[in-house]
Amino acid sequence: MLRGTHTVRLTGREVQRLTQITGFEPIDVRTLDDLERYVRACKRHYWGVSDATRYLHWLIDREVAGCVSQPMDRGGQS
């Protein structure tokens, strides 16, 4: 995820993975709030209490957490 001052942009790989997991392309995701709305909409679409549904929700959460918490590249500095 690329972050600006008030905006975010998902990388092509992140868009591809989220689309593969959810079946919905994360279009118009420009802020963290937009990303949260996307996740809520996906989970609302795939609602339920089955093991498969809980696993899918976990996959979505894991993928989004990976996008949000990526370490910043410091150009080789530690």
Image: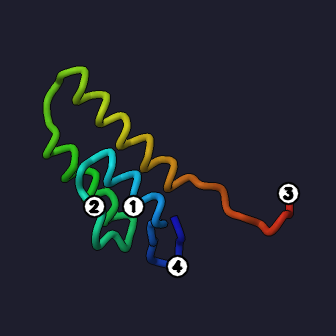
Look at mark 1 in the image and give the residue it sits on: 15
Marker disc for residue 5: 4
In the picture provided, is 76 more to the left or to the right than 34?
A: right
Q: Tell me the amino acid under the disc marked 1.
A: Val
Spot occupied by residue 47 in the image (x, y as percentages of width and height):
14, 36
**Marks 2 and 4: which is nearer the front?**
2
Q: Residue at x 47, y 47 (%)?
A: 65
Closer to the chain start, of discs 3 and 1, is 1
Q: What sort of colour scheme is used for the picture?
A: rainbow
Whether tag 4 and tag 1 are in contact, CB under 8 A, the answer is: no
Which structural element holds mark 2?
loop
Tag 3 residue: 78
Say whether marks 1 and 2 touch (CB < 8 Å).
yes
Q: Which residue is mark 2?
A: 25
Question: What amino acid is found at the position of numbered circle 4 in the picture?
Answer: Thr
The disc, 4 or 1, on the residue closer to the chain's N-terminal end is 4
In terms of sequence position, does the residue under pointer 3 or pointer 4 come before the other? 4
**Residue 76: quadrant of the picture:** bottom right
Circle 4 — which element? loop
Image x and y of residue 57, in percent:
30, 36
- Relative horizontal placement of residue 25, taking residue 4 as reference (left or right): left
Q: Secondary structure at mark 3?
A: loop
C-alpha gap between disc 2 and disc 4: 24 Å
